Image: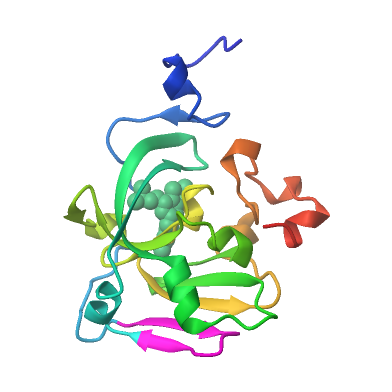
Amino acid sequence: MRLLGPRYPDDVAARIPPGQRLVKGWPVLQYGPIPRFDESTWDFKVSGLVDSPFTVTYSELKAMGPQRVQADMHCVTGWSTLDNQWEGVPFRTLAERAGPKPEAAWVITHCDYGYTSNLSLGAMMDDDVMVAWGHGGEPLAPEHGYPLRLVVPKRYAWKSAKWLRGLEFVARNERGFWEVRGYHTHADPWREERYSYQETKDAESEP
Ligand SMILES: Nc1nc2c(c(=O)[nH]1)N[C@H]1C(S)=C(S)[C@@H](COP(=O)(O)O)O[C@H]1N2
Ligand SMILES: [Mo]
């Protein structure tokens, strides 16, 4: 039994991972400034261990969508929001176009101002993983990642990299911005995989 903290109706409680609480509104969280978007110089690159690396403009990328995904969001600092409506392109669509080589097993996100994050290709191939430009029927707000962010609903939200500029397929795990600062490679909120000291050997190979 929970002695402290808010109580939720059972159906809501069942959707809140351990150690998380619901917040009203949508907090803004990042390290560093919010980049300015200039569509004339912006591009999005899919690179690394793929048969057909490609670079697209914003309108070319948008022409690959849209798909809509409804998903919850869990930040490792403890807040969660439910039923976000995202609009974008599934990661799978990008991966199909690029054609990952057999050695490709990890994906690194590259963002403006050098933010990175890493996940296994298995985790990225989940059908709810996407690059998004819309939220709640509106374009993403600049502070939430406009013009493009990654959305990985089943992982803590630092994996959902804002101001995304590229995805790189690699063979070995390379830790990203928060992962080198003590956060978990896997980051599954239902297993409370918050910190790197919790990692077992299989965090390197498991999806
Ligand atoms: N580029 C970039 N993306 C980022 C971050 C960041 O610092 N830089 N912070 C992450 C963290 S810790 C969280 S919780 C979510 C927050 O997204 P939001 O500000 O849209 O709520 O963005 C993630 N994406
Ligand atoms: Mo976060």
Residue 122, image x, y percentages: 62, 62
Residue 87, image x, y percentages: 28, 57
Colour convention? rainbow
- Residue that appears at 58% across and 29% down: 18
Residue 6 visible, this angle:
no
**Which quadrant: the N terminus?**
top right
- Residue that appears at 38% across and 87% down: 55
Q: Give the image quarter of residue 49.
A: bottom right
Question: Which residue is situated farthest in the right direction here?
Answer: 201
Q: Give the image quarter of residue 39.
A: bottom left
In the displayed structure, would residue 82 be above or below residue 177? above
In the displayed structure, would residue 189 be above or below residue 37? above
In the picture, measured across the screen, residue 168 lies left or right of residue 69, that is right
> Which is nearer the eye, 189 or 196?
189
Residue 193, image x, y percentages: 65, 43
Residue 13 visible, this angle:
yes
In the picture, measured across the screen, residue 21 lies left or right of residue 137, that is right
> Which is nearer the eye, 43 or 114?
43
**Which quadrant: the C terminus?**
bottom right
> Which is nearer the eye, 7 or 3?
7
Residue 2 on the magenta span: no
Q: Give the image quarter of residue 65.
A: bottom left
- Residue that appears at 43% across and 35% down: 79
Which residues fall within the magenta stretch? 43-55
Residue 45 on the magenta span: yes
Number of marks: 0
Residue 26, image x, y percentages: 30, 41
- Residue that appears at 52% across and 47% down: 154
In the picture, measured across the screen, residue 17 lies left or right of residue 88, that is right
